[in-house]
Image (tube, coloured by chain):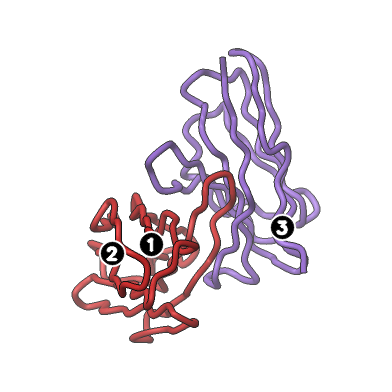
Chain colours: A red, B purple
Amino acid sequence: KQEVTQIPAALSVPEGENLVLNCSFTDSAIYNLQWFRQDPGKGLTSLLLIQSSQREQTSGRLNASLDKSSGRSTLYIAASQPGDSATYLCAVNSGGSNYKLTFGKGTLLTVNP
Amino acid sequence: GAGVSQSPRYKVTKRGQDVALRCDPISGHVSLYWYRQALGQGPEFLTYFNYEAQQDKSGLPNDRFSAERPEGSISTLTIQRTEQRDSAMYRCASSLARGSGQYFGPGTRLTVL
């Protein structure tokens, strides 16, 4: 059974700092991995999707890497802003089904002005 | 374009009542998913549709839960004889095809009194 762990559970940083969020998964036979952002009262916003054959994806100030063999992904946020404050969720699409996402519990990020 | 929509956004019901939650996926998305999210947790998979066919319902907690997607577009998740433990955020997602990135709606917050 796939298990996804996100570290840290919460993170508070001053504005402008670069930061890294970590995600680990137990079964490396994945199809793809998605990073989401969750804001209170709103849905999950897809940030980045990395296919199992890829090593990284970039979108603006966000960069996600994937090391499938070690069961790890990181989300790098450059020059953080108060608007980046949210819960960030990592979700793994396990290779067996290629449709069922297994989520971590998320990292609550607070960027202080 | 329009994203995934869900209704109602909030539902308060009394124990023992039936509830129906609706999901309208992104136009053209053939795959549709239902997840349930408890406070402080990531979403957990409930069921998956490919077009109108329910291909996986392994995540439905018990037989009080059912889902349908009769015309391959709008889906309804029905909970019969609700119990307090059913209180959660119910999230719907859709994707262009099986295995592609999933896009989530705003969710329905269900509270069972």
Dot 1 or dot 2, earlier in sequence: 2
- Residue ID at (44%, 68%): A81
- What amino acid is at disc 3? Pro
Q: Residues within 10 Å of mark 2 (few under 14, many from 20)?
A: many
Front of the two marks 2 and 3: 2
Same chain for marks 1 and 2? Answer: yes
Which chain letter matches label 2? A
Residue B58 % position (x, y): 47, 45
Q: Are marks 2 and 3 in contact (CB under 8 Å)?
A: no
Whether A5 is drawn above or below A35: the answer is: above
Residue A67 % position (x, y): 26, 79
Which structural element holds mark 2?
A: strand
- Mark 2 sits on what residue? A23
Query: Is residue A56 shown left or right of residue B15?
Result: left
The foreground one among A82 and A88 is A82
- Residue ID at (69%, 57%): B4
- Residue ID at (58%, 53%): B33
Residue A27: name its quadrant: bottom left
- Mark 1 sits on what residue? A90
- Mark 3 sits on what residue? B25
